[in-house]
Amino acid sequence: MYVPAHFAMSPEQVAEVLAGAPAGDLVTTGPDGLAATYLPMLFDEASGSLIGHLSRVNGQWRDAGEALFIVHGPDDYVEAVWLATADADSVPTWNYVTVHARGELVTHDDPAWTLASVRRLSAAHGDASVDEMPEAAVEKLLRAIVGVELRNLRLEGKAKMSQNKSPQVVAQVIDGLRSSGGAGSADWMLEHSLPRAEAKAGLLAAIRKRR
């Protein structure tokens, strides 16, 4: 993924996006080429792995080896008028947050491991129904799925959220997003982009003052 320095995310921001993403795209390479499945995976900060499961009839679980898991944070269309200033017009763009997790895909065709991962994933969404199911139903469920784990993660995050613009423009984009229903992007920018833009503006002002 191409990540300009001003759009790079901190490790803390990357971990936050991974932990908060409900699902993502698991991309692998197998005998028939590239394969991708959209599925929930739980980020285990203690082990540094992503855990989940695939349907047994989905042959992607056999694609052991290097794999990529892609998750997305808030994203929205940004109108040109929100980016314009008194000195310059602009063009529309798309703001987004995304994280790529590369690692080694490992299969766990083990009911105990898979059940533990299903319980953890369900609990993360506030669902304990697995423990309320009859034992026979649980065993049938486990025969139909295969546990998967993405290990030895190499994490890379990109937040193209107008943080390279002036504080004035960042504030305009935040207001525009709120007015158009992009509250998630507006909140992210208020927490991350605006402070960064203000810090940069303050630094440049201090440099100009010293000259």
Image: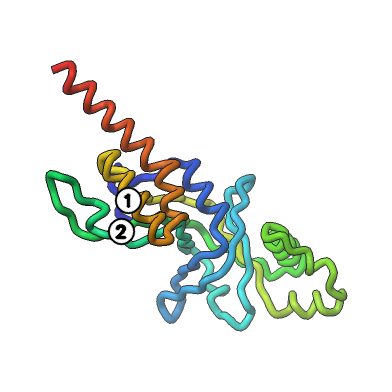
Disc 2 designates what residue? 78
Image colouring: rainbow
Disc 1 designates what residue? 173
Point 15% across, 45% down: residue: 86
Q: Residues within 10 Å of mark 1 (few under 14, many from 20)?
A: many
First-in-chain label (1 vs 2) = 2
Is residue 103 left or right of 93 when viewed as pictured? right
In front of the other: 206 or 51:
206
Q: Amino acid at mark 1?
A: Val
- Whether residue 100 appears in this view of the structure is no
Are discs 1 and 2 less than 8 Å apart at CB?
A: yes
Give coordinates of residue 199: x percent, y percent.
33, 31
Give coordinates of residue 179: x percent, y percent.
39, 57
Point 46% across, 68% down: residue: 27
Residue lying furthest front: 179
- Whether residue 122 appears in this view of the structure is yes
Q: Secondary structure at mark 1?
A: helix
